[in-house]
Image (cartoon, rainbow, N blue to C red):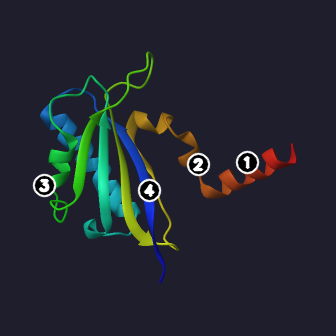
Amino acid sequence: MDWQMRAIRGATTASENTVETIREMVTELLDELENRNQFQPTDIISVTFSVTRDLDAIFPAAIARARPGWDNVAMLDVQQMHVEGSLQRCIRFLIHAYLPTSASIHHVYLRNATSLRPDWSLPQTLQASQQAVKSKV
């Protein structure tokens, strides 16, 4: 089986800037990531979490590091660049992992963060038909 480094994106939003809320949202996001993608934490090379400037109660990496198998993953927390009018209270991740080339990648966007990548929220068949229409235009 051939393996290659792959990137997985994801994001969610928090309703408020508290340790409890951020912990709940990061846990939900990573649970969904693990449920939708077939890999182990040992396959992960690194994770970069970014948060908007209105979230500073806890580091998302501290939450992830407490998960089984995630304590040896290289993680970094950064502040997302602020753009006026952009999505508030947003937590994002970018994961690099070694995965089989045949593995499907499922990017995870939850709550209000679904607006960031609505194209990844559409069923695959609908995406394929939209691309076919664009190519004919």
The residue tagged 4 is 7
Q: Residue at x 30, y 52 (%)?
A: 47
Q: Quadrant of residue 91?
A: top left
Disc nearest the viewer among 2 and 3: 3
Q: Quadrant of residue 14?
A: top left
Count neighbours of disc 2 (C-alpha within 10 A) and say few if under 14, some if 14 to 19, many if 20 or more: few
Q: Position of residue 30 (x, y in %)?
A: 29, 53
The residue tagged 1 is 130
Report, in whole angstroms, how far the alpha carbon at label 4 lies from the one at label 1. 24 Å
Label 2: element kind: loop
- Going from N to C along the chain, the mark reached first, 4 or 1, is 4
Label 1: element kind: helix
Report, in whole angstroms, how far the alpha carbon at label 2 lies from the one at label 3. 32 Å
The residue tagged 2 is 122
- Going from N to C along the chain, the mark reached first, 2 or 3, is 3
Given the image, on which type of amino acid does mark 1 rest?
Answer: Gln
Q: Toward the viewer: 123 or 73?
A: 73
Q: Are marks 1 and 2 in contact (CB under 8 Å)?
A: yes
**Mark identifier at residue 23:** none
Disc nearest the viewer among 4 and 1: 4
Report, in whole angstroms, how far the alpha carbon at label 2 lies from the one at label 4. 20 Å
Disc nearest the viewer among 3 and 1: 3
Count neighbours of disc 4 (C-alpha within 10 A) and say few if under 14, some if 14 to 19, many if 20 or more: some
Q: Are marks 2 and 4 in contact (CB under 8 Å)?
A: no
Q: Toward the viewer: 128 or 40?
A: 40
The residue tagged 3 is 66
Q: Are marks 2 and 3 in contact (CB under 8 Å)?
A: no
